[in-house]
Each structure stands twice: as structure tokens, then as C-alpha cells.
Image (cartoon, rainbow, N blue to C red):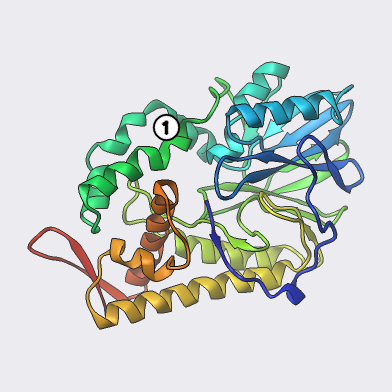
Amino acid sequence: MTDTIQSPQQALSYPFPAPPELGTFIEVAPGILWARIPLPFRLNHVNVYAIEDGDGWAIIDTGLDYADARATWDALLAGPLSGRRLTRVIVTHFHPDHIGLAGWLCARFNVPMLTTQTAYLGCLNVALRPGNLLAEPYRGFYLTNGFDVQTMEKISTEGHDYMWKVAPLPPTFSRVVAGDVLDIGGRSFAVLTAEGHAAEQLMLQCTSEKLFFPADEVLAKITPNVSVWPVDPDGDPLGLYLRSLNAIKQTIPEDVLVVPGHQLPFYGLHKRCDELALHHEMRCSLIADACRKTPRTAAELVPVLFHHIQLDAHQMGFAFSEVMAHVNYMIRCDELERATMQDGIHRLVTK
């Protein structure tokens, strides 16, 4: 789901040096609990949170819909969460590792799902149109950017099979928008949204506890995946992501405890935002250098950025889409230009 980046450890501090064991919670603030749900990927977990909400618990994010994740939820519900009901399920964005079990939990406990309109409709669109990944213009997205047919088919099938590990969504949802304030157990949580990793990604700030829930927008040791997908082939998610990082720095104080969607909670929000922006700047430089030497397809740029990782079909799909995010951003910044050759393949050159 994400790409590794080395983080200067002196810049960040970690009040909880080890994550909770599966089926257990760590209290990050009074009445706010952090657990992990397993994922069957290289990134092997997603963080979920339970917040005291009157006589029950409000849940933030849910994990992917598969057997190990359901078993972990069963252990949490029978153990540290037992004796209280669930009051609502809050979903930060439509990626399956965050929304995958929302419908299952909502149906099991007859509670509402709160999320952004984009998250709800985005997930619903994927669920209703699974055949699109092997249809035009989706096939063309990969083929015209340099992949052969065999690789394209692997990415479009086994590379994206995780997208359907999502329990059926509730037929209705409660819409949350930027500028709202959620009252959860007497605490006020300001609602913010971010772009780049996922459209209209929900973030929460609790000023009284100095807590910031950025979902996947800011992670401690890895960079959130920022990708162009076939449905929006000319989109600029990297430009939107960099804009969101800057907005976070302008809006959220430096001294908050960051409680993210993956990895460990940490202090050092502004420094981490700067590191992430610098990381993408360095990636753009690598692409510019490669395309200065010879015209390259986007597929040929994957090993330029991901030479340190052996990529399976799942990871190749994300790596390529992340390359495309940098390519589109650089074209918009007038640093690259795209030429379509006689073979119909797009190649990129440095301007």
C-alpha cells in the first residue's frame, strides 16, 4: 500500500515504542484505545481506534474483510470492548483496509456509519463495477504507458483482488464534511479532509487532548501511497497531496500526538510533513534524470523509483500508479513532456 522512506529518528518521538498485540488495545489517551487489525500484505496491519462514547464505543476504521480480520475483531469485542455496545463506525476513506468491515460491524450492532460522501460513493462504485479493471480504457491505461499484455492482466486481476475484500456497505450513511465538529463522549473532534492518498480523506483533531487522527495522510516511517488510477488518468494526486501537507502544517499544532492509520503514534508532525514533501521532490529529481538520458515510458520508470524492492503483482500496481502521480505532477509543473510514438506508447522526456 505504501513505499518505505527512511525517517531521521531524532526528528520524531514515539510514546508507545511497541504496537498492541492482536486482540488487545493500548490506551493513547483516557478513554481512547488503539488496536491493530491484520492485513495479508507487506504492510501487514491497519490501526483502528475505539473512543468512549457515553455507554459505548465509537470505532474509527475497520480493516479488510477476511477471516483473520474478523477473528481479531471477535477477540476485541469479547475482550477489551466487552460489556459496552458500539455506538457508530467512523470510516476515514474508501480504501478496503479502512472500510472493509464497516458494513459487517454496522449490521452486527445496528449502528450508523459516518464517513465522507466521496468515501461512501467511491467504495460503492468499485463494488458495483468489478469488470472495469479489464475493460477499456483501463487496459489502455497500462498498455499505452509501457506494460505488455501479460503484465497488464496480472496487475488488473491478482494485483487488485484486494479491492473486493469489502463487506456489503450499509444502504445509508451519515455524511461528514470538513468543518463539522463531532461530539464523541463529551469530547469535540474537528473534522478536516485531505487529498492525494484518497479523495476527501477524513481526519479528526481533538484539541482538548492534543490528538490528531490523520488516517493515512501522514505516517511515521513510510510514505502514503499517492497514485493515479485509470478512472482519472490525467489527475494530479501528488499536487493535491503536497497542498494537503501544507494545509496540515498551517492548521494543526506541532505538539499534537499523531495517531495514524498505520505504524506507531508519534510526535513531530510538522517535521514529518516536511520529510514527506522532500521525499517526493527527490523522486521527481530521479525521474527527471532518467528521462533526460533517454525517453522513458512510465512502466520503465518503476525500477527507477522502486529498485530496492522485489515487486509482486499487488505491489507493481501501486508502484506504477505512484510513478504516474509523479509524472502527471511534473507535466503540470512543465518539467516533463509526454510524446506518443508511432507504436501508440507514451514516452516521457525532460523539458
User: Which residue is depicted at the point 51% across and 56% down?
Assistant: 225
Q: Quarter holding the C terminus?
A: bottom left
Q: Nearer the viewer, residue 333 or 285?
A: 285
How far across and down, in percent of the image, does residue 209 sit? 87, 53
Q: Is residue 304 left or right of 197 when viewed as pictured? A: left
Residue type at mark 1: give it: Asn
Q: How many marks?
A: 1
How far across and down, in percent of the image, does residue 236 sit? 40, 60
Q: Is residue 118 left or right of 274 when viewed as pictured? A: left
Compared to 292, does 200 lie above or below? above
User: Which residue is depicted at the point 85% across and 60% down?
Assistant: 15
Q: Residues within 10 Å of mark 1 (few under 14, many from 20)?
A: few
Query: Where, by quadrant of the figure, is residue 75 drawn?
Result: top right
User: Which residue is depicted at the point 82% across and 59% down?
Assistant: 17
For this orientation, the residue located farthest to the left is: 342
**What residue does disc 1 label?**
125
Query: Where, by quadrant of the figure, is residue 31 drawn?
Result: top right
How far across and down, in percent of the image, does residue 326 sit? 40, 66
Q: Is residue 307 left or right of 29 when viewed as pictured? A: left
How far across and down, in percent of the image, does residue 299 sit? 30, 61
User: Does residue 115 show up?
Assistant: yes
Q: Secondary structure at mark 1?
A: helix
For this orientation, the residue located farthest to the front is: 310
Q: Nearer the viewer, residue 205 or 11?
A: 11
Query: Where, by quadrant of the figure, is residue 130 drawn?
Result: top left
Compared to 342, does 69 lie above or below? above
Q: Is residue 163 left or right of 250 when viewed as pictured? A: left
User: Does residue 351 show up?
Assistant: no
